[in-house]
Amino acid sequence: MHKILTFNQISVKGLERFCREKYEVASEIGSPVSIMLRSQKMTPELIPETTLAIGRAGAGVNNIPVDYCTEKGIAVFNAPGANANAVKELIVCALLLCSRGIAEGMQYVDSLEGMEDEQEMHKLLEKEKKQFKGSEIAGKTLGVVGLGAIGSLVAKTALRLGMNVVGYDPALSVDAAWRLPSEVQKIENIQSLLSRSDFVTLHLPVLDATRNLINSDMVASFKPGACLLNFARPEIVDTDAIVSALDKGLLRRYATDFPEPALIKRSDVSLMPHIGASTEEAEDNCAVMVADQLIDFIENGNIKNSVNFPNMVLERTEGYRIAITNNNVPKMLGNVLAEFSNRNINVIDMLNKSRQDIAYNLLDIDVEPTVELLAAIKEIDGVISVRAL
């Protein structure tokens, strides 16, 4: 029986992927083989020694000590793209909030509480509605910084809404390039994109290269009167630089899912309480994706959408499977294979990949592995973990 420890409220649709005959899933359980969570802040002390994998039902893994997990041979999974549609729809909402006096108009209407005369109210609204006049997004240019799962969806939707779309992504993958509509004009540098865009939306992970990407220097590249949308990560934007740009009129409006004290009560800022992925559908999609990935890893050793292990899938045909995690150093594979050769064990199929300091191996052999064999492999210097599947 495989034990799964859960934190937070995980979608029932995700939990139902674990069949009861093989898995025991609970928020309080000892010796789990895997942990499934959403926003829980994980520390090494919260990770039992039996843990082989952690699955985060979402895209970001900032709440998981990834370096520690890698050192311990724990695969960390996420769910990239599972909440992409939810975030995309909120960004469309933000575009309209930045273009039209929607929120301001609604607040004004609410201020009329107590006015009893319907005709008088209609006359007043006709008189005052001009202060909430906006502009249409059709025909405007949207700059998409980061063309992954969410960015490409935003680009497609903007095109359908009649916008011109330019995109920048220095690390555009082949898969992402295939998803991208041909109408999206790729820009070679971010400054050029900023100077051409009426709206700019950010879709980047937090890396050393992206932290405070939108800073005081970068703000100077924006097209006058542009609007900036950040529904990716707060660390990408220097809030002080944004406030200064708004005060000086370099930016017309800022919309974000990450409120900060300096942004509260500003009429030129649209703040949302981190609700980009807060839909039932997104929570279901993330939980199902992560559950399926954990099941495939536990039962077959396959890895998909890991942030610290190499992605690899070896189809099961015949024989017995062994999964080995080791430090990515020379001669490791030869030392492991020697243990099979010394026992006249035939390797039917195998796959070996590495990612930075970690290497992962799947081997199908023709006889059932003994406890003695597994122990011998585990004793090899540099092997972190070994398990029979």
Image (cartoon, rainbow, N blue to C red):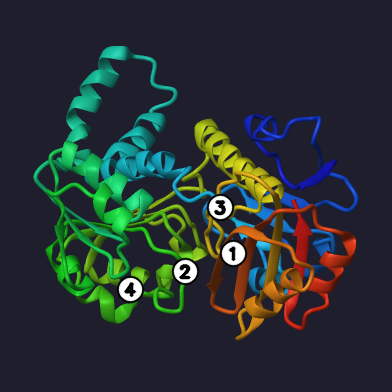
Residue bearing the label numbered 1: 62
Mark 4 neighbour density, 10 Å: few (under 14) some (14–19) many (20 or more): some
In this rendering, would 48 be left or right of 233? right
Q: CA distance from mark 3 to mark 1?
A: 29 Å
Marks 2, 3: nearer the viewer:
3
The residue under the point 70% across, 46% down is 299
Q: Is residue 301 visible?
A: yes
Residue bearing the label numbered 3: 314
Amino acid found under the numbered disc labelled 4: Ser
**Quadrant of residue 28 in the image?**
top right
Q: Residue furthest left?
A: 139
| Residue 294, percent from left and from top | 66, 47
Q: CA distance from mark 4 to mark 3?
A: 53 Å
**Quadrant of residue 139 in the image?**
top left
Mark 1 neighbour density, 10 Å: few (under 14) some (14–19) many (20 or more): few
Q: Earlier in the sequence, mark 1 or mark 4?
A: 1
Residue bearing the label numbered 4: 244
Q: Earlier in the sequence, mark 4 or mark 3?
A: 4
Q: CA distance from mark 2 to mark 4?
A: 23 Å
Q: Quadrant of the N terminus?
A: top right
Amino acid found under the numbered disc labelled 1: Asn
Residue bearing the label numbered 2: 206
Q: Are marks 4 and 3 in contact (CB under 8 Å)?
A: no
The residue under the point 88% across, 46% down is 29
Q: Are marks 2 and 1 in contact (CB under 8 Å)?
A: yes
Between residue 110 and residue 31, name the one nearer to us: 31
Q: CA distance from mark 1 to mark 4?
A: 28 Å
